[in-house]
Amino acid sequence: LAKEAKKGGMMMYSIANEQCNQFGVCTNSGGAKVNERLITLLYAGRSELTAVNCPPLHKTAKEIEMLLQVPLIQSTLSHMLNTGSKPSGGGGSFGALYAFSRSILPYIEEADREAAQVIARNIDFQLQNQPSNDSLDAATKALKGTIPKMGVDCDLVGRLDGRNVCASPASSRSGSVFWSLLLCAGLSLLGMVVAIVL
């Protein structure tokens, strides 16, 4: 794990860095722009938590929640493209597509239930039946049409194959109280870890 971390991070941080080139959203140093914003917000959240400054902390947690969706959306779109370009659905690519699409499906459903149903129906993991190009096109269209409704910053998601992944600016969304509380708990844990290390 330590070796992987030295290569440029792990988990969500690593996923964002892997996708930034394809979507044209890397910084000059080669990392993902979304990661830079996340790090800034995590430090801000730590300060707000230490000061027991709850209103700004809640706002910070909501923005972190939005940013964490970006690499998942990018990975879903990327695997939609890769799966459709390979014979018989691309095997492993489809497995990854299924996993990534399911990771953001609750957010999609919150923004547009009909779009979530289209994605769930057309990206259904069945070993004997891989999705057709028509199914992938329908799921891709549903996802792209929903991104602006999810409160996600389209500029951070970027462009795929030279095209914007969403057609209009991000709109505000009420969000999930549960995830905000979970992120606050994560910030609390981060604050404790940093305090112990320092």
Image (cartoon, grey):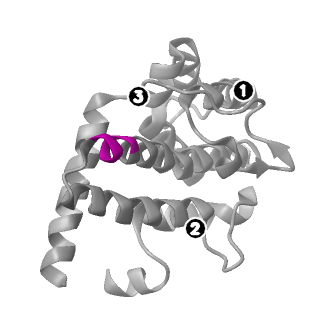
Name the foreground residue: 102 vs 111: 111
**Badge 1: few (under 14), some or many (20 or more) residues near its Cα, within 10 Å?**
some
Instruction: Check the image and name the residue furthest to the right.
Output: 162
If the image is split into quadrants, where does the C terminus sit? bottom left
Which badge, 2 or 3, is on the more N-terminal residue?
Answer: 2
**Badge 3: few (under 14), some or many (20 or more) residues near its Cα, within 10 Å?**
some
For image coordinates 21% across by 66% down, the residue present is: 191
Question: Measured from the top left, where is residue 190 in percent x and y?
Answer: 23, 65
User: Magenta stretch mostly in which secondary structure?
Assistant: helix
Question: Measured from the top left, where is residue 82 in percent x and y?
Answer: 70, 50
Name the foreground residue: 99 vs 129: 99
**Badge 2: few (under 14), some or many (20 or more) residues near its Cα, within 10 Å?**
many
Q: Is residue 195 magenta?
A: no
On screen, residue 6 versus residue 161, left or right, reads: left
Which badge, 3 or 1, is on the more N-terminal residue?
Answer: 1
On screen, residue 150 versus residue 188, left or right, reads: right
Residue topped by disc 1: 141
For image coordinates 50% across by 49% down, the residue present is: 67
Secondary structure under the numbered disc 2 in the rendered image:
helix
Query: Which amino acid, mark 1?
Result: Lys
For image coordinates 32% across by 85% down, the residue present is: 2
Question: Measured from the top left, where is residue 86 in percent x and y?
Answer: 73, 49
Query: Which amino acid, mark 2?
Result: Asn
Q: Which residues are magenta?
A: 55-59
Residue topped by disc 2: 17
On screen, residue 186 versus residue 26, left or right, reads: left
Which badge, 2 or 1, is on the more N-terminal residue?
Answer: 2
On screen, residue 172 versus residue 59, left or right, reads: right
In this rendering, the label closer to the viewer, 2 or 3: 3
Residue topped by disc 3: 175
Secondary structure under the numbered disc 1 in the rendered image:
helix
Question: Measured from the top left, where is residue 184 in percent x and y?
Answer: 25, 47
